[in-house]
Image (cartoon, rainbow, N blue to C red):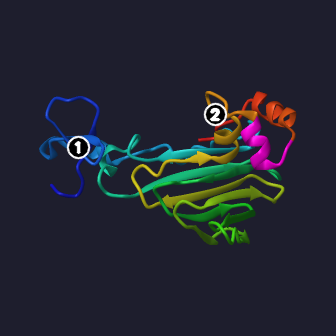
Amino acid sequence: MRASLVAIKATDHAVFVNGKLCKDPKLAVAEDFFLPELNIPGNTSNPVGSMVTPANVEKIPGLNTLGISLVRIDYSPYGGLNPPHTHPRATEILVVVEGTLYVGFVTSNPENRLFTKVLYPGDVFVFPVGLIHFQFNIGHTNAVAFAGLSSQNPGVITIANAVFGSDPAINPYVLGKAFQLDKNIVKQLQSRFWWDNN
């Protein structure tokens, strides 16, 4: 079997490939390529009003070495936000299934150009690899989207969480100067709980 090298956590009968231990292909089973949970809505009763449910190599071991993954994103009515974030190892293609989303991404320096669009069910939008992007539910009902990512392990860096919620904290003087804020405002932002919807 060369369809994929199934990831495995144990070291018995394993080979290390692409960052994961791999099961002997002769021992692969259908469950290595299956995930039944993307029909279940994510819990959006959190501070950002969204939940990302991944279907990546951690949940589908058969994705190992195939260079793809998928997520379901649920958004609460008007205001559900998948906050500005980036995937350092993947381009994302998003399709709206329910609701109305305002989406966008920002190009890299020095342009920092914002590309935005309002999406309806069936609409598709692409977020290029590594660029900061977001989705915001502007409708008055729940919204649901699915996104394909061009990596088995795309990674995610949520900007506010990384900048203001790092451990240990970034020096407030550094952030104050970078964001042109008083260091007391920076300290206030750093004292908040930064919700992770992933």
Q: Is residue 195 magenta?
A: no
Q: Give SS at disc 2.
A: loop
Which residue in the protein does label 2 denote?
166
- Judged left or right of residue 40, residue 64 is left
- Judged left or right of residue 26, residue 63 is right
Quarter where residue 171 is shown:
top right
Q: What is the x, y in percent for residue 158?
A: 63, 46
Q: Nearer the viewer, mark 1 or mark 2?
A: 2
Q: CA distance from mark 1 to mark 2?
A: 40 Å
Quarter where residue 112 is shown:
bottom right
Residue at image point 74% right, 36% down: 46
Q: Is residue 15 above or below residue 128?
A: above
Q: What is the x, y in percent for residue 49?
A: 75, 43
**Few, some or many residues within 10 Å of mark 1 (<14, 14–19, 20+):** few
- Judged left or right of residue 89, residue 165 is right
Q: Nearer the viewer, residue 116 or 69?
A: 116
Q: Main secondary structure of the magenta part?
A: helix
Q: Nearer the viewer, residue 146 or 107?
A: 107
The amino acid type of the residue labelled 2 equals Ser
- Judged left or right of residue 87, residue 177 is right
Which residue in the protein does label 1 denote?
29
Q: Which of marks 2 and 1 precedes in the sequence?
A: 1
Q: What is the x, y in percent for residue 148?
A: 49, 60
Q: What is the x, y in percent for residue 193?
A: 74, 30
Q: Nearer the viewer, residue 39 or 161?
A: 161
The span picked out in magenta is 173-181
